[in-house]
Image (cartoon, rainbow, N blue to C red):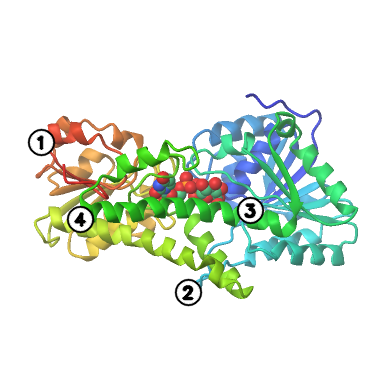
Amino acid sequence: MPIEESGDGMRISVVGCGYLGAVHAASMAELGHQVVGIDVDERKIGALNAARAPFYEPGFEDLLARTLATGRLRFSTDIADAAGAAVHFVCVGTPQKRGEYAADLRFVEAATESLLGVLAPGELVAGKSTVPVGTAGRLAELVADKVPGALLAWNPEFLREGFAVTDTLHPDRLVYGLPAGSDREVAERLLDEVYAPIVAAGTPKVVTDHATAEMVKTAANSFLATKISFINAMAELCEATGADVKQLADAIGYDDRIGRKFLNAGLGFGGGCLPKDIRAFMARAGELGADQALTFLREVDNINMRRRIRMVELAREVCDGSLLGKHIAVLGAAFKPDSDDIRDSPALNVAAQLQLQGADVRVTDPAAIDNARRLWPQLDYADTAEQAAASADAVLVLTEWRAYRELDPVAFGKVVASKRVLDGRNALDREAWTAAGWTYRALGRRAG
Ligand code: UGA
C-alpha cells in the first residue's frame, strides 16, 4: 500500500541516528516532513549526509538518497539544529549494563537533557527507545519542570532489522503512551499529524499511558523470545526421543491460535534487542518487587544459550569426537540474515567457542565480515562460502542467508574434505543434501 506524502509536513527532529533513528528520520522525510537527524558521532553523520548507510539494511540507502535529494532531510551533530521542531524523537540505544541485567539509560537521559536546551512550550518529546517501565514518567517530570508547557510521550517502535524501512512506513500498529490530563489531546494530535498517512491507511492505533506503552514493547519482545525458546525446548526433547522439531512446528503452527511464525527451531535468538530486553525486563521486575512474574524469562534465556553449546557438541560429534585441528567452515556471522549486525550473534558465539576448543575456524558472511573481524580478530575470514569451506572437515550453516539456503550441495561437495553439514537454522533442503552424499545434522532432528 503506497503511503502518500502529507502536505507541507511538520518540522521534526530525531535524536540518535543508529539503526532506529536513521531509518525513522528518513522515513519521516518520506512522509513529507522536514526532518533533522542529530547524533554525536561525526562519522555517522558524515556518512548519512553523503547518502551512505552506516549499516546494512535492504532498501535504506535508496530511501536515504531519495529523501536527502528532496531537501527535506539533513543530519547534524549540533543539537541546536533541533530547535523549532514540533516533535523531537528520542531514538538512542539502551544497551545492557556491563555485568548487570539492567538497561543502561545513560544515552536516553543525555539525549533528553540535551533537548531541554532547545525545547519550547507546546513541543513534544516522543521517546522511541526501548526503556524500563517508569522511565517515561520520570523524564516527563523532568521536561515539565525545565520547560513548562512542553510534553513527553512514549511511542515504541517494532521494526525488525532487515525489514526496517517497510516496518517503519507500514507498521502493524501504532502505540502512543500519552501524558494525563489536557496534555493528552495535544500530544495525540501531534503524533497523529506525524503519522497522518499511516493513520489514514487504517493502521490500528493503541492510545494509552506512558507505563503501558513502555511495557508493550518489552512484553512483545519477551513473547517473541519465549516463542523461540519454546520451540527450542521442544527441539531438545526431539533430540532425546528421535522426533522431528520441524514437522512438529509445522503441525502445531497450523493452529492459528499458535501460528507458525517465530517457531523456527535452531540456534536461537541473538541481536541487539531480544536478549538484552528480556534481561532488562527481569531486572526491572525485580526493582518493582514483581520478579516472580518474570522468572520464566530466565529459563527462556537459558534454553536459548544451551542451543549454542549443543551446536558445538554436535560439531564435535560429527568431527569424530574431537575438534582439535579440524577445519570448520562457518557460514554466517550476522545474528540473522539481511543484517550486518553481530551483537550477541549466536553464529559468532559458536564460531568462537569452536576456535577456543582447538578447531581451525573460517567464517564467511555476505555483509558482516568487517564487523565480525573487529570483534573476533582471532578467527579466520573468507569472502565466499566456497573459500570458507575449502578442505573443510565440516560446514556449519549458522545464519540462514538466502545464498546459503540456495547452495548447490553437489557442486559445494567438491570443495570440502568431508561432506558433513550442520544446519544450525533448519534452513537447508535435507533431502537434497543427503542425496548429494552429505552427512546432514540439525538441531532437533534425526541425523540425515
Ligand atoms: C526484534 C523484534 O522482532 C522487533 O519487533 C523489535 O522491534 C526489535 O527486536 C527491537 O526491539 O528493536 P530483530 O532483533 O531485528 O527484531 O530480530 P528478529 O527478527 O526478532 O530475530 C531475533 C533473533 O531470533 C534472530 O537471531 C533470529 O535468528 C532468531 N529467530 C527468529 C529464531 O531463532 N527463530 C525464529 O523463529 C525467529
Amino acid type, mark 3:
Val
Could you say which is closer to the camera, residue 313 or residue 402? Answer: 313
Residue at image position (79%, 41%) is 11
Gap in angstroms between the C-alphas marked 1 and 4: 19 Å
- State the residue position of label 4: 314
**Residue 335 showing in the rendered view:** no
Residue under numbered circle 2: 99
Is disc 2 in contact with disc 3, using a CB cutoff of under 8 Å?
no
Q: Which residue is mark 1?
A: 437
Work out whether residue 65 or residue 394 is closer to the camera in this orientation and state it.
Answer: 394
Residue visible at 10% across and 44% down in the picture: 418
Residue 360 sits in quarter: bottom left
Q: Is residue 326 left or right of residue 407?
A: left
CA–CA distance between discs 2 and 1?
Answer: 46 Å
Tell me: residue 364, above or below residue 27. Answer: below
Q: Position of residue 345 (x, y in %)?
A: 39, 54
Q: Is 269 situated left or right of 411 in this image?
A: right
Q: CA distance from mark 4 to mark 2?
A: 30 Å
Of mark 2 and mark 3, the one earlier in the sequence is: 2
Q: Which residue is mark 3?
A: 216
- In the picture, measured across the screen, residue 171 lies left or right of residue 344, that is right
Q: Is residue 145 above or below residue 327?
A: below
Marks 1/3: CA–CA distance: 48 Å
The kind of residue tagged 2 is Gly
Q: Nearer the viewer, mark 1 or mark 3?
A: 3
Counting residues from the start of the chain, the first of labels 3 and 4 encountered is 3
